[in-house]
């Protein structure tokens, strides 16, 4: 990844420049310490949020057609209060409103045109001739522009494409470092202070434009070298593979016409992908074996609760406890995905990994930064994440006061070259009250996160576990062809 | 679809409408449990079908004899008299059922009212019933053994007998209640009707009306109506046995068909009236001038907006042979506007602003409304219905979800593209003009189309013709064959 060192250098420079200065834009908070961020009175945070929303709205209106159209539909010309931006949040389909047929016909010029309307970067001169896969197209795009795209897991067969660029990626990577640093030493610490000595365990692909995007840039600052960046699968998560199942189903639905037009480049990957699938158990064994090699060391390990529990059960079978050093770092979260967890699952996971406690997170691919779970088991939005709570039925904005439950929606102010307003598929409870969380952080906090019903939330699950499911489904499809 | 919610004892559930369980002329209203209806947040109470499941099947097949002691004309007389009693103004059961339907159905009041007031009775006209018999089976096969001389020298004999069946009926159209009752009566079948949660009462209302007329009439005695939660294994494992039923007639969504398919074994014949999607093809001639375009748009509006697009024959994707160059796109966009206006103008007894709007579809429309690069959205933001005009020769990726009066018009350079999009899930295709229909209908049929009609006729009643590319009435019968002759005077495999 050629931009890695440039991004790490840019982050360092930005943090140095911010030191000792008050935040003016909401992204400035990203480069402050966790303690400074959550010690800022929330009234001040809100003022900066408002000023930033105004600036983003005015700045992006001109260049981003869909935002302009939405503002016109809603009759919004200026923003006076944070609430005014609520009707301007993009719905869950905006980043996937391109026709799938463009992929089958290798019309990547048209796809570029579609994406170009969602970013301030000029994509009109990109040469995409000869591209025949999504991965190839995105590689080309990123080679010729500052774009660093992310995509969803595409469980519906269609990826949301989030038009991030260098600017947002800096914020994104910094937020991964920041996540590890709990408020007032609540947990974790500054991983960069360890000078690249912290091995990383990531139970997925090493490269890709999904969950691994930040880590593949951040890793030199955490573990120092390739050797200690230990991933379960070699190579890159393929966007083409994630969408394969859905694309085959869509082709089927179109009758003979669909079958005739399925992209041959996709089908050519079939053997390679099937070979990969055959080797998955072998890869997972090797990954587990690697963890044992690092026994007793201080590491960083990443995984959903589901994947951590799987490893724990395997470890228990082999009689292993206290795998890593007690001051290791963990990044986890996600729901239980319909699986049955034993009552003492949390204690068992901690016992196996050898850590006294683990903090969950709440976030989504579309929004930069994972919220930290505090010791009171509440999630705390960062200042660049303006929370909006909508009535799941009517879409009406719920008041920013008291305790409210609704559909989690957000304005991600870390998005500077695209519009960061979005609506999630989750129902959450937000505590807006004047009373701060007992953990000491200022500002509203969130708990009781649940998926809205599939009917309401749409079908694209934006989770790490979702990516794996989409992958498995795609491979199953391939095997049947 | 399976209803997810569990039944709860009625005592704890407050007031609900009571949907009776009807077993062969007996009305049961005790042992109530409540269920949620599919729409509207209402509940209804009905006797716990688990307690009565063992009484539902016709255990002794000989008990169908009473049906053979009366003539087909006696059956027709009874149905015609029933039709007279299904007068919405006077029939309290239908009135009660209308109240529940208004809450439980996905259809709006004016459409439901029209169905109850006009549609149901119309089906029971004598001429209509005669046509159903003549076009589907033939009176003589239902009335006795039909002699068929054979080359072998033997005399063949054929008779269509009724069978014992379970009917899993649809709830998206009230008129289905009439269809099931008529089909069962004309074929002298014994039927257990499983009501749907979005229309739990109409079948029961019709059968109650029969009970008032003559509780002991064979037609009444061979219709039972029950509601249980689709997928309730305690009930279904007991009923779906060859010793209890010979036929399962299942209308319904993909999930419900897949679920029922588990019970199929030798001795049970599954007749599926599956979920289907329908489309339209508009030939080049339609775009020759504004008046013709308006005419086609008005006809298409009936197929798209009629019954609020809740029927499987409702058109969703419309292929328009306008060409895809700039002139073609201008034409197709104009046609989209005309279609939108025509749908909005439909009379309220056949189409209204939908009661509910699929939220996922709403999100798709919202996204399209922000960018007309590849799809132009006309209307939709008020969830009143919409027309999506593709600016490329492709339907939207969510074409299967189109509902609530939302059509997608796809411009094509030739009708071949439209023909090749037809597959096994296609039901009706409405075509304009008729000359084009004649040209392409054979190819459409080969690709999987099940019904090819003039534009505007997609929602006409399908009682007298094949349905879903087969003949449900014939399949509901057991076609028993016989031969008369002497072995030594006929030619055959054994005697020659």
Image (tube, grey):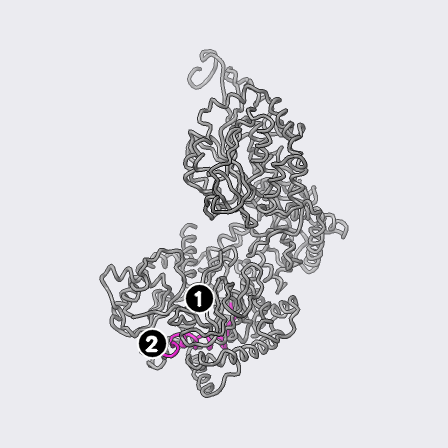
SS type, badge 1: strand
Q: If the image is split into quadrants, where does the N terminus of chain A sit?
A: bottom left
SS type, badge 2: helix
Does residue A209 appear in this view? no
Asked if residue A376 is among those painted magenta in the image, a careful observer would answer no
The front one of A404 and A435 is A435
Compared with B465, B337 (above or below) is below
Residue furthest to the left in view is A319
State the residue at coordinates (45%, 11%): B488
State the residue at coordinates (51%, 15%): B153
Q: Which residue is mark 1?
A: A447
Decide if residue B25 is on the left or right side of residue B280: left
For disc 2, the chain is A
Rounded to the nearest angstrom, the CA distance separating label 1 from label 2 is: 33 Å
Asked if residue A175 is among those painted magenta in the image, a careful observer would answer yes
Report x, y in % for residue B479. Answer: 51, 25
Q: Main secondary structure of the magenta part?
A: helix
Report x, y in % for residue B320. Answer: 66, 51
Decide if residue B150 is on the left or right side of residue B335: left
Q: Which residue is mark 2?
A: A223
The front one of A167 and B92 is B92
State the residue at coordinates (49%, 81%): A28
Q: Which residues are magenta?
A: A162-185
Which mark, residue A351?
none
Report x, y in % for residue A472. Answer: 40, 56
Labels 1 and 2: the sequence-earlier one: 2
The front one of A383 and A63 is A383
């Amino acid at each position: 990844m050629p931009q890695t060192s440039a991004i790490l250098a840019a982050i360092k420079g930005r943090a140095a420049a911010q030191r000792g200065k008050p935040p003016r834009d909401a992204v400035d908070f990203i480069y402050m310490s966790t303690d400074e961020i959550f010690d800022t009175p929330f009234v001040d945070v809100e003022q900066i949020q408002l000023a930033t929303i105004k600036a983003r709205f005015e700045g992006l209106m001109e260049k981003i057609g869909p935002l302009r159209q939405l503002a016109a539909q809603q009759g919004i010309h200026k923003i006076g209060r944070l609430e005014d931006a609520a009707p301007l949040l993009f719905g869950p389909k905006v980043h996937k409103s391109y026709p799938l047929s463009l992929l089958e016909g290798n019309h990547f010029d048209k796809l570029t045109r579609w994406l170009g309307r969602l970013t301030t970067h000029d994509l009109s001169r990109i040469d995409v001739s000869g591209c025949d896969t999504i991965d190839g197209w995105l590689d080309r795009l990123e080679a010729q522009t500052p774009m660093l795209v992310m995509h969803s897991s595409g469980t519906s067969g269609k990826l949301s494409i989030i038009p991030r660029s260098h600017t947002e990626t800096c914020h994104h990577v910094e937020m991964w470092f920041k996540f590890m640093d709990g408020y007032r030493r609540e947990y974790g610490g500054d991983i960069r202070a360890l000078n690249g000595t912290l091995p990383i365990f990531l139970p997925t692909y090493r490269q890709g434009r999904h969950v691994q995007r930040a880590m593949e840039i951040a890793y030199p600052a955490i573990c120092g070298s390739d050797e200690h960046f230990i991933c379960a699968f070699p190579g890159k998560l393929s966007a083409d593979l994630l969408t394969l199942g859905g694309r085959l189903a869509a082709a089927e639905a179109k009758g003979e016409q669909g079958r005739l037009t399925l992209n041959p480049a996709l089908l050519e990957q079939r053997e390679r992908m099937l070979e990969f699938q055959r080797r998955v158990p072998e890869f997972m064994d090797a990954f587990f074996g690697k963890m044992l090699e690092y026994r007793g060391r201080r590491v960083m390990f990443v995984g959903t609760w589901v994947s951590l529990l799987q490893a724990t059960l395997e470890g228990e079978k082999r009689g292993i406890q206290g795998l890593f050093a007690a001051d290791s770092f963990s990044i986890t979260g996600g729901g239980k995905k319909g699986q049955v967890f034993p009552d003492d699952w949390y204690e068992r996971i901690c016992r196996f990994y050898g850590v006294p406690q683990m903090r969950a997170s709440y976030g989504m691919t579309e929004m930069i930064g994972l919220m930290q779970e505090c010791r009171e088991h509440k999630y705390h939005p960062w200042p660049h994440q303006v929370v909006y709570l909508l009535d799941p039925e009517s879409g009406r904005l719920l008041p920013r006061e008291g305790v409210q439950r609704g559909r989690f929606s957000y304005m991600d102010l870390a998005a500077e070259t695209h519009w960061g307003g979005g609506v999630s598929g989750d129902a959450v409870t937000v505590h807006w009250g004047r009373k701060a969380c007992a953990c000491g952080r200022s500002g509203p906090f969130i708990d009781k996160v649940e998926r809205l019903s599939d009917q309401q939330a749409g079908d694209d699950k934006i989770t790490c576990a979702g990516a794996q499911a989409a992958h498995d489904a795609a491979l199953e499809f391939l095997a049947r062809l | 679809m399976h209803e997810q919610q569990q039944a709860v004892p009625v005592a704890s559930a407050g007031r609900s409408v009571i949907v009776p369980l009807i077993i062969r002329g007996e009305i049961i209203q005790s042992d109530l449990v409540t269920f949620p209806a599919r729409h509207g947040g209402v509940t209804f109470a009905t006797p716990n079908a688990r307690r009565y499941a063992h009484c539902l099947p016709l255990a002794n097949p000989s008990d169908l004899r009473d049906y053979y002691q009366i003539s087909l004309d006696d059956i027709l007389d009874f149905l015609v008299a029933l039709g007279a009693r299904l007068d919405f103004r006077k029939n309290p059961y239908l009135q009660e059922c209308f109240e529940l339907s208004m809450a439980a159905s996905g259809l709006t009041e004016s459409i439901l009212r029209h169905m109850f007031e006009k549609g149901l009775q119309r089906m029971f006209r004598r001429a209509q019933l005669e046509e159903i018999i003549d076009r589907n089976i033939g009176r003589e096969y239902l009335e006795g053994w039909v002699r068929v001389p054979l080359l072998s020298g033997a005399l063949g004999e054929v008779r269509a007998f009724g069978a014992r069946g379970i009917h899993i009926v649809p709830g998206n159209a009230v008129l289905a209640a009439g269809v099931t009752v008529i089909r069962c009566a004309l074929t002298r079948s014994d039927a257990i009707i499983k009501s749907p949660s979005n229309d739990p009462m109409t079948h029961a209302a019709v059968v109650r009306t029969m009970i008032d007329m003559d509780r002991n009439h064979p037609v009444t005695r061979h219709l039972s109506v029950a509601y249980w939660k689709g997928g309730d294994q305690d009930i279904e494992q007991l009923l779906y046995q060859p010793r209890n039923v010979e036929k399962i007639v299942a209308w319904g969504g993909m999930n419900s068909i897949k679920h029922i398919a588990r019970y199929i074994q030798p001795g049970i014949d599954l007749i599926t009236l599956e979920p289907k999607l329908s489309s339209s093809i508009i030939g080049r001639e339609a775009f020759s001038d504004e008046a013709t375009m308006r005419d086609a748009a008005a006809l298409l509006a009936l197929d798209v907006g009629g019954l609020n697009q809740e029927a499987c024959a409702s058109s969703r994707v419309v292929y328009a042979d306008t060409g895809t160059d700039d002139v073609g796109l201008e034409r197709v966009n104009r046609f989209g506007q005309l279609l939108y206006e025509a749908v909005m103008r439909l009379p309220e007894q056949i189409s209204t602003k939908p009661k509910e709007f699929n939220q996922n579809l709403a999100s798709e429309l919202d996204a399209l409304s922000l960018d007309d690069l590849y799809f132009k959205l006309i209307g939709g933001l008020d969830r009143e219905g919409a027309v999506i005009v593709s600016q490329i020769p492709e339907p939207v990726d969510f074409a299967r979800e189109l509902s609530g009066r939302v059509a997608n018009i796809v411009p094509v350079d030739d009708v071949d593209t439209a023909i090749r999009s037809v597959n096994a899930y296609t039901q009706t295709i409405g075509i304009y003009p008729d000359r084009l229909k004649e040209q392409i209908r054979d190819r459409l049929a080969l690709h999987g189309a099940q019904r090819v009609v003039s534009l505007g006729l997609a929602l006409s009643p399908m009682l007298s013709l094949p349905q879903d590319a087969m003949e449900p009435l014939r399949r509901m019968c057991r076609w028993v064959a016989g031969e008369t002759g002497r072995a030594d005077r006929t030619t055959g495999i054994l005697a020659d």
